[in-house]
Image (cartoon, grey):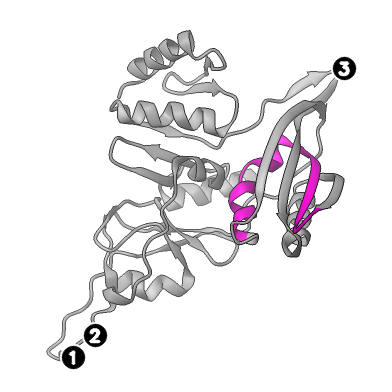
Amino acid sequence: VTSRHLRDRLMKETEKNLALKVEDTDGADSFQVFGRGILHLGILIETMRREGYELTVGQPTVIVKEIDGKRCEPFENLVVDVPQEFSGRVIDLVTQRKGEMLIMESKGEMQHLEFDIPSRGLIGLRSNMLTNTAGEAVMAHRFTDYRPWKGPIPGRNNGVLLSKNTEKTTGYSIDKLQDRGTFFVDPGEEVYAGQVIAEHIKPGDLVVNATEPKKLTNHRASGSDDASRIAPKTLMTLEECMEYIQQDECIEVTPKNIRMRKVILNEEDRKRVQKSMAT
């Protein structure tokens, strides 16, 4: 798991994976890996995970170029076929991400939509699109060219719930916190401080205690075990995690687990960094 082994493995991959490019960074234990999209990078990370490597992955970003003194970013042509009742939601989602509609035509029951959209806007769009169209949308996109930078694109709307302690989660705690968000962990799972354990229902992050055991009293009641009422955890694939995380988060990839966490695990350190960035 040392960075030397990781570097050797990445360099070996570039010999046969022609679309991949690896560069060293200022830090000895981090590398910049360039690929042809989230799926391409996801396959590489998943292969390495199964080979026994452990690594953390930061938020994927697009490759920006300087053309004629202007900062330019890649644009793509996005094609969406969707039932007519959902077309308004699709147009709304894409225009929020700086997309511009080129074509809109009906094909029987379906609406055929074509957009010009910055590649940045496509990160995280697929899961939102499927949620908003009840899984009916068929989406394809291809790279067109580099154009001037479009400005900020809104990221994830909701914050996350972070674990306060390093311990096993309990059904009692998760049951009490269920109305705060959707959990990515089940009762009895090992979590650590700074790990992302759920999606918050509101913007902004919240540090919660999901490891508190139930206080035992002398009174018992039949059928009062809260663990049975807990909704099953949301399972996220590696690609979904890569689309989900924000700038200050990363994914911890090990042969057994894929977990999301904050880059700075300690709560006090995170606050200190946020304050220094604000000033």
Mark 1 Cα-neighbour bin, 10 Å: few <14, some 14–19, many ≥20: few
Does residue 59 appear in this view?
A: yes
Q: Nearer the viewer, mark 2 or mark 3?
A: 2
Report whether 102 appears left or right of 136. Answer: right
- Residue 221's label in the rendered image is 1
Badge 2 vs badge 1, beta-carbon distance below 8 Å:
yes
Q: Position of residue 155 (x, y in %)?
A: 65, 49
Q: Position of residue 186 (x, y in %)?
A: 31, 61
* First of labels 3, 1 by sequence position: 3
Q: Position of residue 268 (x, y in %)?
A: 45, 52
Magenta region: 107-131
> Considering the numbered disc 1 on the image, is that residue within a helix, a strand or a loop?
loop
Amino acid type for the residue under numbered disc 1: Ala
Report whether 132 appears left or right of 159. Answer: right
Determine the CA span between mark 3 and mark 1.
Answer: 74 Å
Determine the CA span between mark 2 and mark 1.
Answer: 6 Å
Q: Tell me the residue at 45%/29% (across/down).
A: 43
Amino acid type for the residue under numbered disc 2: Ser
Badge 3 vs badge 1, beta-carbon distance below 8 Å:
no
Residue furthest left as drawn: 218
Amino acid type for the residue under numbered disc 3: Asp
Mark 3 Cα-neighbour bin, 10 Å: few <14, some 14–19, many ≥20: few
* First of labels 2, 3 by sequence position: 3
Residue 122 located within the stretch drawn in magenta = yes
The image quarter containing residue 209 is bottom left
- Residue 68's label in the rendered image is 3
**To which residue does mark 2 refer?**
224
Q: Tell me the residue at 53%/22% (across/down).
A: 32
Q: Nearer the viewer, residue 82 or 211?
A: 82
